[in-house]
Amino acid sequence: MASIHHTTMTPTKLELLTEWLPKQSWYAGNAEAPELLKAGGFRLDDPGGAVGIEFMVVGDATAQEPVAYLVPMGYRGAALEGVPGEALIGTSEHGVLGTRWIYDGVHDPVVMAQLRALLRGEAMPQHQSKSDTPDPTVTVHGTGPDDGLDVHVNRVLRPAEAAQRSSGRLVAGWTWPDGTAAQGVLAAVVPR
């Protein structure tokens, strides 16, 4: 199980995401500098122990309508080869581990492999900020991907999607900027 280090990161994850998020094609806001708040999420363990895996939900307090984004992230001790440049969210100095390369998890093969494992029931979601603590609020409904199926990550989260009955889906909650709780589908199994 991964250990959570309660230490500093410079710049912080939210600072990196504030710069990176508006450049993404799926960004739904109209502010060049969103005011992001940590709204939820969970972690997965890398069986190899080399990659930190976090699925962070951030809320944008500057949006006219409430909006929440899912950003899966892979934290690495070295640059990841063979991914597009926009996959790098940024680098940060971790108070214990040193320089971390933080990647958009949809481009990180370890992050996506563990997400598939979670959807197949072969991985356990972990609490976002506590070491060795499963997160029972993150649930999988249906069956995970097989050879003919893939996984789609929902970047802009909508609470109504929780009612979907797709073959396999990952459901978790988050908090809107006004403090209201919500729940929806973070990822779903889709045809390849």
Image: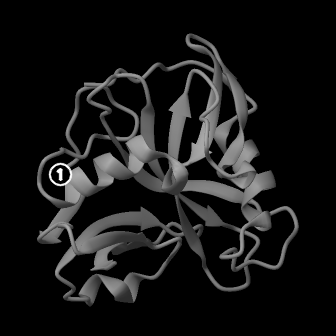
Q: Quadrant of the C terminus?
A: bottom left
**Percent position of residue 44, x then y:** 32, 41
At x 76%, y 55%, the residue is: 20
How many numbered callouts?
1
Q: Nearer the viewer, residue 134 or 76?
A: 76
**Percent position of residue 173, x then y:** 35, 65
**Percent position of residue 151, x then y:** 34, 69
Q: Amino acid at mark 1?
A: Pro
At x 56%, y 67%, the residue is: 69
Residue 179 appears in the figure = yes
Q: Nearer the viewer, residue 111 or 139?
A: 111
**Percent position of residue 153, x then y:** 43, 68
Quarter residue 47 falls in: top left
Q: Is residue 38 above or below residue 27?
A: above
At x 21%, y 67%, the residue is: 145
Q: Nearer the viewer, residue 97 or 146?
A: 146
Quarter residue 66 falls in: bottom right
Q: Is residue 77 above or below residue 175?
A: above
Q: Residue furthest right?
A: 32
Q: Quadrant of the N terminus?
A: top left
Residue 137 appears in the figure = no
Residue bearing mark 1: 136
